[in-house]
């Protein structure tokens, strides 16, 4: 098969890496890809959000299957556009991807189908939002409705911080249209767990649990990022908690989407908080999480192409998906300053040495004409190690990462330890 993966981060490198092992995949492409992906797939210089150019390219080059990995092209309807040209794709249609693209939609869905989540109100006007914040008091959480690169959420510890967040989203237009509506919700407490699930419209199969580390600095301090590291499985996600999540959250969500005429095919991401009142949904995403994907796919023992085809064909219930009985840790090496301002274009050394004990997925890198690998983004690499248990996987990821250097390299020293 000729397969194209859309995207160009660590998640896409992990997907390309897994697909490259499939005997079914004869030609592998990635658009736009990055400096590391280029060693496994042919990179195609089309932006992930350029739906028309992507679909035209796929038709012209007779792709047999397309994996749409990032949130933006899913929200823009890339899967629908590919289907319209008769090209099979992995990922939800636009009407199901809205579960991530609109928090107002996802909160409404949970309320209608009694899926446990934080209590909330939705606002389109600033003054009533400010009134609500003052009445509820702090801590309280303010969220922009639309996609904001994981940065449209403020967990405010004080009323004035919450007021400031609502003002900057609604009045100052910090997130453009994404912030014209806000959700204000109860602040929940408890450990966070991510569960990615394969879904075929009807059936759903959870992958091993994982935990992301969203804050930029050790001890969960500093600004929210796309994710600074991930481990799998997540401590605290016991078989009993998993059973409750399946019954109270995962299956009801799949059924709700189907009942609404929005059957979900692809990866459905459950961001959960294990609160004193039981597991509750923090957020849904319509795709693999990144960096969770890098840790979780490292544990996969089944051909990923077979899984993607089963999701597309609605036959997930017929496939046995196997996982290594191990643990994984993905440590993100970022550009100093990320998620704020940072410089790029620095040469990276030590990749080969690190690759002897871990898989180094590339996120923000590019290959220079002279063959050197240069930094080109905020999150640069995901050093991903597998071990018999979490502790050894974490130690191995840190040990492997020691070989790598580039100017202003920043990483957290406590991934999997908080
Ligand atoms: P989100 O983008 O919705 O996942 O939010 C980013 C992060 O903010 C989450 O991973 C949580 O750590 C935190 N967060 C979001 N909603 C809540 C909430 N209702 N209570 C406590 N923390 C939250
Ligand atoms: N790691 C969180 C996300 O991909 O949204």
Image: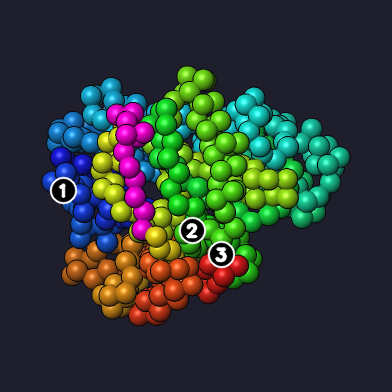
Q: Is residue 288 left or right of residue 99?
A: left
Identify the residue at horizontal 32%, vertical 31% (top origin).
Answer: 315
Q: Where is 119 relative to 387, above or below?
A: above
Q: Quadrant of residue 167?
A: top right
Identify the residue at horizontal 71%, vertical 53% (top origin).
Answer: 189
Mark drawn on residue 216: 3
Q: Does 195 lie within the magenta span?
A: no
Label 2, residues with CA under 10 Å away: few <14, some 14-19, many ≥20: many
Mark 3 or 2 closer to N-term?
3
User: Can you give x and y, in whole percent of width and height, for residue 407 in the image?
Assistant: 40, 76
Identify the residue at horizontal 81%, vertical 37% (top origin).
Answer: 132
- In depth, the one of 129 and 191 nearer the eye is 191
Mark 1 or 2 closer to N-term?
1
User: Can you give x and y, in whole percent of width and height, for residue 69 in the image?
Assistant: 36, 43
Which secondary structure type mostly characterizes the magenta part of the structure? loop
Which segment is the magenta one? Answer: 313-324
Can you tell which of label 3 and label 1 is closer to the viewer?
1
How far is mark 1 from mark 2, CA to CA? 28 Å
Callout 2: helix, strand or loop?
loop
Mark drawn on residue 233: 2
The residue beneath circle 1 is: 23
How far is mark 3 from mark 2, CA to CA? 21 Å
Mark 3 or 1 closer to N-term?
1
Callout 3: helix, strand or loop?
strand
Q: Is residue 288 left or right of residue 179?
A: left
Q: Where is 295 relative to 219, above or below?
A: above
- In depth, the one of 88 and 127 nearer the eye is 88
Q: Quadrant of the C terminus?
A: bottom right
Beta carbon of the mark 2 residue lies under 8 A of ligand 2: no
């Amino acid at each position: 098969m000729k397969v194209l993966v859309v995207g160009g981060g660590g998640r896409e490198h992990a997907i390309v890496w897994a697909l490259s092992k499939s005997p079914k995949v004869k030609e592998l492409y990635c658009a736009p890809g990055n400096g590391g992906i280029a060693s496994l797939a042919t990179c195609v210089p089309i932006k992930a959000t350029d739906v028309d150019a992507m679909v035209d390219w796929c038709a012209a080059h007779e792709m047999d299957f397309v994996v749409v990995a990032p949130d933006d092209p899913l929200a823009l309807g890339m899967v629908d556009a590919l289907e319209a040209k008769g090209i099979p794709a992995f990922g939800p249609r636009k009407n199901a991807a809205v579960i991530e693209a609109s928090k107002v939609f996802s909160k409404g869905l949970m309320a209608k189908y009694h899926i446990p989540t934080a209590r909330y109100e939705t606002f389109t006007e600033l003054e009533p939002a400010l009134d609500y914040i003052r009445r509820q008091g702090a801590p309280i959480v303010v969220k922009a409705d639309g996609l904001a690169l994981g940065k449209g959420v403020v967990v405010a510890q004080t009323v004035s911080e919450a007021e400031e967040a609502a003002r900057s989203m609604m009045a100052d237009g910090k997130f453009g249209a994404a912030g014209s509506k806000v959700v204000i919700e109860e602040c929940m407490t408890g450990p966070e767990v991510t569960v990615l699930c394969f879904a075929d419209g009807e059936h759903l199969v959870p992958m091993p649990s994982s935990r992301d580390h969203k804050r930029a600095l050790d001890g969960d301090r500093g600004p929210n990022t796309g994710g600074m590291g991930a481990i799998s499985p997540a401590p605290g996600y016991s078989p009993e908690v998993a059973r409750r999540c399946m019954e109270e959250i995962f299956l009801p969500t799949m059924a709700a989407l189907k009942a609404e005429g929005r059957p979900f095919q692809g990866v459905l991401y459950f961001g959960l908080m294990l609160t004193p009142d039981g597991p509750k949904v923090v957020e849904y995403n319509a795709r693999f999480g990144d960096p969770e994907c890098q840790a979780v796919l490292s544990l996969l023992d089944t051909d990923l192409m077979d899984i993607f085809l089963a999701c597309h064909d609605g036959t997930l219930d017929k496939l046995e998906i196997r996982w290594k009985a191990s643990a994984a840790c993905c440590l993100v090496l970022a550009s100093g300053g990320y998620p704020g301002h940072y410089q790029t274009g620095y040469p990276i050394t030590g990749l080969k040495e690190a690759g002897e004990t871990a898989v180094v997925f590339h996120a923000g890198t590019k290959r220079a004409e002279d063959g050197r690998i240069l930094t080109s983004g905020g999150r640069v690499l995901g050093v991903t190690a597998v071990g018999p248990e979490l502790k050894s996987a974490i130690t191995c990821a840190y040990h492997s990462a020691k070989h790598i250097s580039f100017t202003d390299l920043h990483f957290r020293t406590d991934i999997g330890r908080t």
